[in-house]
Image (cartoon, rainbow, N blue to C red):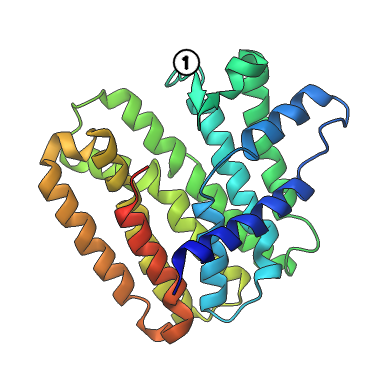
């Protein structure tokens, strides 16, 4: 498949939907709505919502039906970046080539913008047009678990408390599987749920998601020369990421041609350079 065209088309679809779903910039109070749109609608790969849509397609579902949940994932990702950039966290002044949210709008509004994005994501997930109520409940539970103290937040806490370069063994594994990997993994499971996956399909998608989620963090560590790279070395981390990717792709056999997008995305995640 032509992955470049696929990604471009999916990014366009998601960006248009995000523009529709987010509150208008002039809606009162305008400052927070402008900051929300600024933080979400800038350049981004949209990996999480794209994975969700690809998983939905793999199980035979409708992309249109999964689009609100996919966009909610991007709002959650944006919230995490806004908060990560704050002085109390990573203290980054630049995000995606332009001032981070708190540098442009102030620290207080930066905190509130992240809060608003997270809150609005659950409003979007709970909307009536986003599948039947039983499926929406499963999706909401899946996302809440992925970003809570047993997921993204838990991984971030352990990362902060362990200190750079001092994490060992099981601690590093915990961080890698939760700090970034949990939301990546949840993205494909959510897509499968929205697509009406059978239990067998859901199990296969979950296996794929767990592996690519970990690969995503391992590649981050390679790019930053941090985390697992400090502990195990570049070569060992690269080899493990490659092995996990092969295993993830093997999980997709039952989907045949419908799993090709997920397969291509797995190799994209493995070989990305940013």
Q: Is residue 101 above or below residue 153?
A: above
Q: Position of residue 79 (x, y in %)?
A: 58, 35
Splitting the image into 4 quarters, where does residue 247 fall?
bottom left
Nearer to us in this view, 79 or 39: 39
Q: Secondary structure at mark 1?
A: loop
| Screen quadrant of the C terminus | top left
The answer to whether any part of residue 192 appears in the image is: no
The answer to whether any part of residue 13 appears in the image is: yes
* Circle 1 crowding by C-alpha within 10 Å: few under 14, some 14–19, many from 20: few
Q: Position of residue 66 (x, y in %)?
A: 65, 65
For label 1, the residue is 88
At 49% across and 23% down in the image, what residue appears? 94
At 57% across and 72% down in the image, what residue appears? 56
Nearer to us in this view, 27 or 117: 27
Q: Position of residue 214 (x, y in %)?
A: 32, 52
User: In this figure, what is the number of numbered marks?
Assistant: 1
| Screen quadrant of the N terminus | bottom left
Q: Position of residue 17 (x, y in %)?
A: 72, 54
Splitting the image into 4 quarters, where does residue 256 fall?
bottom left
Q: Is residue 101 above or below residue 1?
A: above
Q: Is residue 87 above or below residue 16?
A: above
Q: Is residue 82 above or below residue 237?
A: above
At 47% across and 74% down in the image, what residue appears? 202
80 to the left or right of 230: right
């Amino acid at each position: 498949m032509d992955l470049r065209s696929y990604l471009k088309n999916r990014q366009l679809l998601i960006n248009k939907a995000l523009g529709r779903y987010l509150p208008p910039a002039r809606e009162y109070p305008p400052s927070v709505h402008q900051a929300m749109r600024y933080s979400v609608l800038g350049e981004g790969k949209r990996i999480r919502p794209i994975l969700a849509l690809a998983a939905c397609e793999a199980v035979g579902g409708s992309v249109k039906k999964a689009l609100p949940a996919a966009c909610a994932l991007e709002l959650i990702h944006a919230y995490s970046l806004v908060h990560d950039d704050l002085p109390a966290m990573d203290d980054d002044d630049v995000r995606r080539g332009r001032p981070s949210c708190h540098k442009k709008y102030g620290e207080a509004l930066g905190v509130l913008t992240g809060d608003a994005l997270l809150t609005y994501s659950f409003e979007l997930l709970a909307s009536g047009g986003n599948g039947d109520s039983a499926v929406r409940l499963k999706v909401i539970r899946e996302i809440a678990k992925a970003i809570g103290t047993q997921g993204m937040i838990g991984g971030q806490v352990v990362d902060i408390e362990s200190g750079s370069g001092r994490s060992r063994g099981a601690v590093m594994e915990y961080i890698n599987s939760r700090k970034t990997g949990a939301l990546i993994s949840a993205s494909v499971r959510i897509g499968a749920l929205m697509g009406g996956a059978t239990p067998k399909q859901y199990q296969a998608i979950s296996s794929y998601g767990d592996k690519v989620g970990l690969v995503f963090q391992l590649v981050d560590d390679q790019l930053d020369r941090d985390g697992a790279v400090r502990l195990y070395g570049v070569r060992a981390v690269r080899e493990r990421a490659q092995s996990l990717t092969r295993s993830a792709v093997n999980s997709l056999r039952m989907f045949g041609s419908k799993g090709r997008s997920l397969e291509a995305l797995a190799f994209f995640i493995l070989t990305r350079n940013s």
